[in-house]
Amino acid sequence: MSKRVLIVDDSSMMRKMIAKLLQPPGHIVVGQAKNGLEAIEMYKSLKPDIVTMDITMREMDGLAAAKEILSYDSSAHIIFLSNLDEEVYRAEVEALGARGFASKHKAREILDMIEQTEMGE
Amino acid sequence: MFTWLQAANDVSLKKKARLFFLLNFMLTLITAAGLLYALAYHDSGMPKNFYAVLCILLVVLLSVQVVAMVYFTRGVIRPLAEIQAASRLMADGHLETLNHVKRADEIGSLGENINDLAINMQEVLLFVWNHSQSSRDLLENIARNLNFSLEAEKHSPAGENGVRKDIRKMHRNNENLKSIVMSFSYFEIKLEDEKMVSDYRQESGVKIS
């Protein structure tokens, strides 16, 4: 089933790569945000099914943005993407109750996580 | 004339701006003085108000020029100098640097674009690092399966066969690639002891490891 995805990453190159990854399975990229502040605004206006959220960003990082989005909509599906291992952010990610964590460099992992997300949870 | 124009491109923007405004100011003063003198000398019964209005116009004109110069210095030259300094740091490998120039005009756009370049560069380099680490692990596995150690000797011993020599060469190339990546500094990420670690500081200044 195709999902409406909001891509959040401060790197325009990374946003392009994730958008390219989502194309063949038929997912729709509804928006692209370059920092946490833009992500919050775009989430409220676009209401995507899934948000792929980079953690390390200028202005406002992914963890702070996810906190805001989840307080606005507790059913938001946020998948964190990072260069670092999950262990580094495990505590924060679990405290937020976010839907998942994937390495930026493992494309298959990201796609699997998006496809496994059940809507209506 | 063309040579002069080309030479002008090598003079600093600050100096050019100062010269431009000074010339404008002087020319305005000289023109105004000349006009007032000519009118006074050939007094054809102009009412006194006329001279008063001319003087007020002159004051307004000169004030506008001063304000324009101040704005140009603060609003154009200074932000460009900040962008110049920040982009120099980025070019020298400090990818955690940021242009803080926030405005919607061309100068703001220039600052943002340079920031985006640094951010993308960080992404590419960290990608390269991760893949180099995977390659190193694979090469070490292959070496172990072939019963030799990559670390034991830096260079191929004399008479070593083709496959081992090639694997050592690949390992050396890999290590060279990693040392290039390590010569940069990154935003909220540090590369130390063969590991990529978070350099994220909470508001209290505490590091998360």
Image (cartoon, helix red, strand yellow):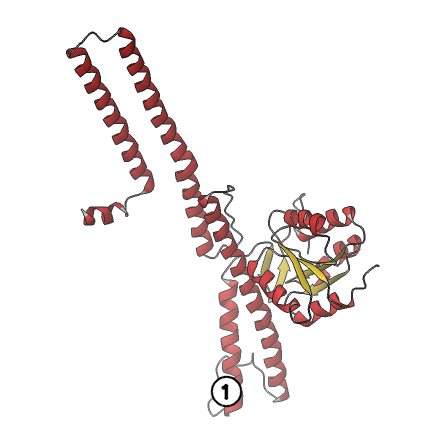
Q: Nearer the viewer, residue B9 or A26?
A: A26
Q: Nearer the viewer, residue A113 or A45?
A: A45
Q: Nearer the viewer, residue B103 or B11?
A: B103
Q: What residue appears at the point 60 percent right and 50 percent down from the top-left corner?
A: A58
Location of residue A77 in the rendering, given as x and y in whole percent from the top left corner? 76, 57
Task: Report if residue B39 is visible in the image.
Answer: yes
On screen, residue B10 versus residue A115, left or right, reads: left
Q: Amino acid at mark 1?
A: Lys
Position of the C terminus of chain B by quadrant: bottom right
Location of residue B39 in the rendering, given as x and y in whole percent from the top left corner? 19, 14
Q: Nearer the viewer, residue B87 or A48?
A: A48
Q: What residue appears at the point 79 percent right and 56 percent down from the top-left corner?
A: A94
On screen, residue B106 versus residue A112, left or right, reads: left
Circle 1 is placed at which residue position? Answer: B165
Q: What residue appears at the point 35 percent right and 20 percent down from the top-left corner?
A: B60
Circle 1 residues within 10 Å: few <14, some 14–19, many ≥20 = some
Location of residue B19 in the rendering, given as x and y in whole percent from the top left corner? 27, 34
Q: What residue appears at the point 78 percent right and 53 percent down from the top-left corner?
A: A96
Q: Which chain is mark 1 on?
A: B
Looking at this rendering, what residue extends furthest in the right direction? A121
The quadrant in which residue A85 appears is: bottom right
